[in-house]
Amino acid sequence: MSNLFSPLKLGDVELRNRITVSPMCEYSSEDGFANNWHLVHLGSRAIGGAGLIITEATAVSPEGRISKYDLGIWKDEHIEKLKEITTFIHEHGAVAGIQLAHAGRKASTVRPWEGSRALPVEDGGWQVYGPSAIPFNEVYPLPEALTLEGIKKVIADFKSAAIRADKAGFKVIELHGAHGYLHHTFLSPLSNQRTDNYGGSFENRIRMTLETVEAIREVWPVPRPLIVRISATDWAEGGWNIEESIKLAAILKDKGVDLIDCSSGGLVAHQQIKIGPLYQTHFAEQIKKETGIRTGAVGLITTAEEAASIIDSGRSDLVLMARELLRDPYFPLHAAFKLGVDVSWPIQYERAKPRKKS
């Protein structure tokens, strides 16, 4: 039997298998509120057999949204619908996780299907922030460098969001520190040119991430699972790299982080990514090997055999899947059958469960 369908204990939570629904922006909220789209989208993946289901990037403040239509958790009114969703997920055997996020200099943009450009203030856009006044590219908004008070506010926003996540019934928090969003821009020297305690040296560039983790841990204490998503490399000369990711992962492990979600890229428009099947898995493997922390592998994992090979070879502890789970919400059930593993199906669907021919 493949270890892909073996349980995994993270803190005080046990996942029924190693297949995780990766955070995927839906751009379907109004004023940050979840709605029935999110209930059906996330609930379908619970019925489909995934072990852990992580919400899309959920903004900790209005200015932390990528677009006007992002999910949010910056006010108590957001809790009620999120609670309905987590309850449904847990009723069907999966674990509900939330990705807490701030888009930083990639905020105030239109939805992907509307183009790639900034959302003007006159159309409902807002001032964006980053470590330094350096835009992502020529069509993205110019960020304002965060003041020290601004940094304190962002950290406080993450802490408040973690409290709301608890009230909404989430069992896992993931801090988004990847893909060119706010925390990632502090990590990388390509986007962080500060000269204060939050810029320059490696120790200064990781400071905001560490302080955010510490703030979350004050209200989300061990052994409650905390994941950090990072971009293991910027895929650009002079940027954040795998060696720094390994150093950061070791520090985060000591700070009470349970798992590193190992993605990559997204910081700069001139990145040079070598894309192919499992193209990021080696980052998860290397970080796990060098630090001993658990890791999650992501990136073009599309078949049962690929997912099983990653787990069975010990390269990573979880596989986080995105587009394949959009194509097939029931991928885990289908993968189990393909790999010869007998897993439970929802009782309502039991009569459709395929059986191995004797």
Image (spheres, rainbow, N blue to C red):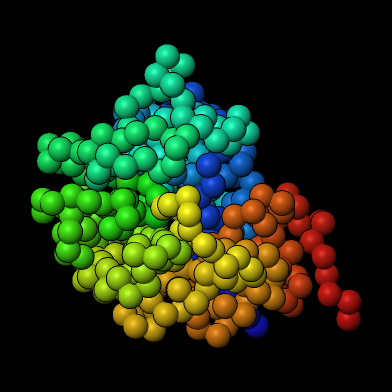
Q: In which quarter of the image is residue 143?
A: top left
Check the image and report above or below for 90 versus 15: above
Which is more toward the observer, 317 or 344? Answer: 317
Can residue 185 be seen here? The reply is yes
Percent x, y of residue 300? 62, 64
Can residue 213 be seen here? The reply is no
Percent x, y of residue 74? 32, 32
Residue at the outermost top position: 122
Check the image and report above or below for 33 versus 238: above
From the image, which quarter does the N terminus lie in? bottom right
What is the total number of numbered labels drawn onto the structure image?
0
**In this rendering, would 343 be left or right of 291?**
right
From the image, which quarter does the C terminus lie in? bottom right
Residue at the outermost right position: 357
**In this rendering, would 114 be left or right of 30?**
right
Q: In which quarter of the image is residue 255?
A: bottom left
Residue at x 44% of width, y 42% of height: 137
Check the image and report above or below for 209 versus 128: below
Q: In which quarter of the image is residue 299?
A: bottom right
Percent x, y of residue 258? 33, 67
Which is more toward the observer, 327 or 183? Answer: 183
**In this rendering, would 227 be left or right of 139?**
left
Percent x, y of residue 166? 32, 44
Which is more toward the observer, 316 or 154? Answer: 154
Residue at x 50% of width, y 39% of height: 85
Residue at x 18% of width, y 42% of height: 151
Check the image and report above or below for 277 versus 34: below
Residue at x 21% of width, y 44% of height: 155
